[in-house]
Image: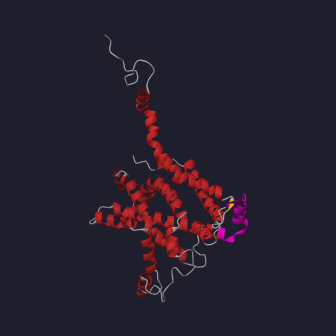
Amino acid sequence: MGEATPTSGVETSGGEPTLRDRLGDLLENETFLGYGSLSPVMLLFLFIAVFPIIWALAGSFFAINAFNPVWEWTGISNYQHLFFEDGFYWSAVVKSVIFGFGSVAVQVVVGIIFALILQRSFRGNAFARAVVLLPYLVPVIVVGLVFQWMMNPNYGVFNLLAIRFGLINEAINFLGNQDIAMYALIVAASWKWSIFVVMMSLARLEAIPSGYYDAARVNGANAWQRFRDITLPNLKGMIILVVLLRGIWMFNKFDIIWIMTRGGPSQSTTTLPVYAYRVAFNQWQLGESLAIASTLFLTLVVGAAIYFGKFNPEQEVRVE
């Protein structure tokens, strides 16, 4: 008497496979299980990332008033108005470039300096690393409000210390002076986000074999030459990646600018995200605001495409 041979992992009743048999086969199919496991994440990604982008790009071709539910097709007129008629738009582009590149440059320099210090072995190193991590744990709104108080011309600690040490004769209104408000924002933003560069640099520095430095010392290389010929080439890929990531995040940064200056004084800190917000919620022109946001998005997409086309991110950050 022969044994029943399970042809599909589930015993059949002798004829056509039942629904239970088909379901059993399906649950044993690795391809189905793989796609089934990923589908909730993919659906979530579509709803929170892809659909809003498509909606924003589509809305930029309409005249949308916040108080009128009817969208009026206008073609590329929103973009024509921004590029050829709206002087504030190009001013906001320049402010975004200054804030984005300026803050990223400061973050990279400060982050690498702190990483080089923390890489050294000294008493209290663990405590110093914990203190350096502190800005990343502080909410942005707290950072913005604290820097507002510290930069206040009447009772701010910056003015108090500068006057006490004889650096200035009278208090400076850091956030009320249109010539220096942007630099004050860069300082606050760099204090908050330099830690990202510190962590990336530390990870890369720890991966450099100590034998490189020993060989350089034997050959008489001084500290600057060791940094120039060993440290900096090993950090190059990380720096490029950090500039891309931090550049994207800082270029569309809205929160800390709005908290500290609201784009002022006299539009001197009105970047593209702040300008898009003002057009949307002060002028109620949602179509034009979406056009501003779309140009910001497309600019960052082009920058990212150039980076991924020119560099190999996996190779740049590989630790060997």
Is residue 221 visible to us here?
Answer: no
Looking at the image, which residue is at 32% across and 66% down?
A: 128
Q: Secondary structure of the magenta portion, mostly?
A: helix
Q: Residue furthest left?
A: 123
* Residue beneath the point at 46% across and 47% down: 41
Q: Quadrant of residue 298?
A: bottom right
In the depicted structure, whether residue 168 falls above or below residue 108: below
Point out residue 235 in the picture as x, y percentages from the top left corner.
Answer: 45, 55
Residue 45, x across and y down, in percent: 50, 50
Q: Is 83 inside the magenta-drawn segment? A: yes
Q: Where are the magenta residues, as a range?
A: 70-89
The one of 42 and 261 positioned closer to us in this rendering: 42
Q: Residue furthest bottom?
A: 169
66 part of magenta stretch? no
* Nearer to the camera, 297 or 53: 53
Q: How is the image coloured?
A: secondary structure
212 is higher (above) or lower (below) than 85: above
The quadrant of the rendering that contains the N terminus is top left
**Residue 54: percent from left, percent from top:** 60, 53
Please say if 13 is above or below 252.
above
| Vertical position of residue 133 compared to residue 150: above or below | above
Residue positioned 46% across, 72% down in the render: 188
Looking at the image, the residue that sits furthest to the top is 1
Residue 32 at least partly seen: yes
Query: Residue at position x 66%, y 65% from top?
Result: 68
Quarter-of-image position of residue 36: top left
| Residue 200 point in image, percent of width and height | 41, 57
